[in-house]
Amino acid sequence: MKIHVLGSAAGGGFPQWNCNCRNCNDWREGATGAEARTQSSIAVSIDGENWLLVNASPDIRAQILATPALQPARAVRDSGIAAVLLMDSQIDHVTGLIMLRESSAPLSVYCTDRVREDLETGFPIFNILEHYSGVTPNRIDLQTRSFEPAELPGLRIHPVPLLSKAPPYSPHRADPQPGDNIGVLFEDIATGRTAFYAPGLGIIEDHLRPYMERADVLLVDGTCWREDEMAREVGGEKTAAEMGHRVQSGPGGMIEVLADFPDARRILIHINNTNPILNPDSDERRILDEAGLEVAYDGLGIEL
Ligand code: MLT
Ligand code: MN
Ligand code: ZN
């Protein structure tokens, strides 16, 4: 199995267009070695030719340009993106679908009913795309334990519901249900190798542990270092937990959680521009290094 990290930042990217927090300022001044990052997305393939786009970031155009494997050029109009899988209906994970509207065939999109409903109502991207490429929605049924997308021979997908809220524009924002947000275990059927991906992982429910235990690679929520990071850095009101994200530091934080899975390669992804781990010389980054945790960057390739 091959994984390309297309975008390793949280919503807004790094630096964020209107942000003058410490990290964003330092980046503009070249004051640290922190690298710019685009918004949250990965691509997964077994054969290296047909790719599953996992979340469609607003930055997808730049991400495709930076990833030659996604452009195999087998025909005058062509793409290596064989299908798309959405983990939620958040802006940073779905807006890129609009940028794929030139597709010569309807976009094959795997998502839960809850996500589909959001994309046909509160953020009606699917309806808009009907005027362009069209969309073929493929239902992710959380009762089924796994499925194999026809477009991606050799790949098995195990979806897992995550406790989280739907986005502000969702008609069911006030009524969280399984399917608003999922994590996924990707399995290479031939080799049995696995990767677990959950860029928004607020609460580590017991039903997730077997998936995380089985994973050779864990690519999980690295949004914030501390709960009040947004308040401290940019005067925001929401805590990380309120946004559905588990912080890295402190009791019960992601560093502690990931200590339970020492045999996996453990990588933090979906990093907010306020997070000190973006600076490779920070104390926080040293703590991660000592804990054996990696920080994802755009262009990171994983082979397993
Ligand atoms: C999140 O991960 O919390 C959302 O994507 C935030 C956003 O982009 O507005
Ligand atoms: Mn996000
Ligand atoms: Zn910032």
Image: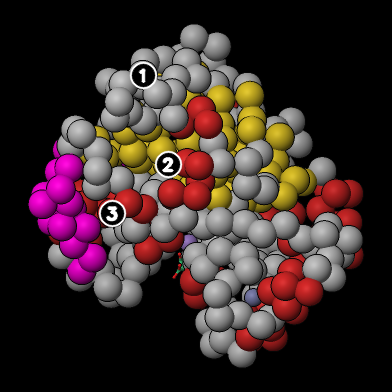
Decide which of 159, 199 is in the foreground and name it: 199
Give the image quarter of residue 143.
top left
| Label 1 near ligand 2 (CB < 8 Å) | no
Give the mark nearer the N terminus: 1 vs 3: 1
Q: Which label number is shown at residue 74?
A: 1
Q: Give the residue at mark 3.
A: 98
Q: Give the residue at mark 2.
A: 54
- The quarter in which the N terminus is drawn is top right
Kindly identify the amino acid type of the residue bearing the numbered disc 1.
Arg
- Looking at the rendered structure, the secondary structure element under dot 2 is strand
Give the mark nearer the N terminus: 3 vs 2: 2
Decide which of 174, 129 is in the foreground and name it: 129
Residue drawn at point x = 60 percent, y = 80 percent: 19
Highlighted magenta segment, given as a residue range: 122-143
Horizontal and vertical percent position of residue 99: 32, 51
Frontmost of labels 2 and 1 is 1
Magenta stretch: residue 138 in it? yes
Magenta stretch: residue 190 in it? no
Give the mark nearer the N terminus: 2 vs 1: 2
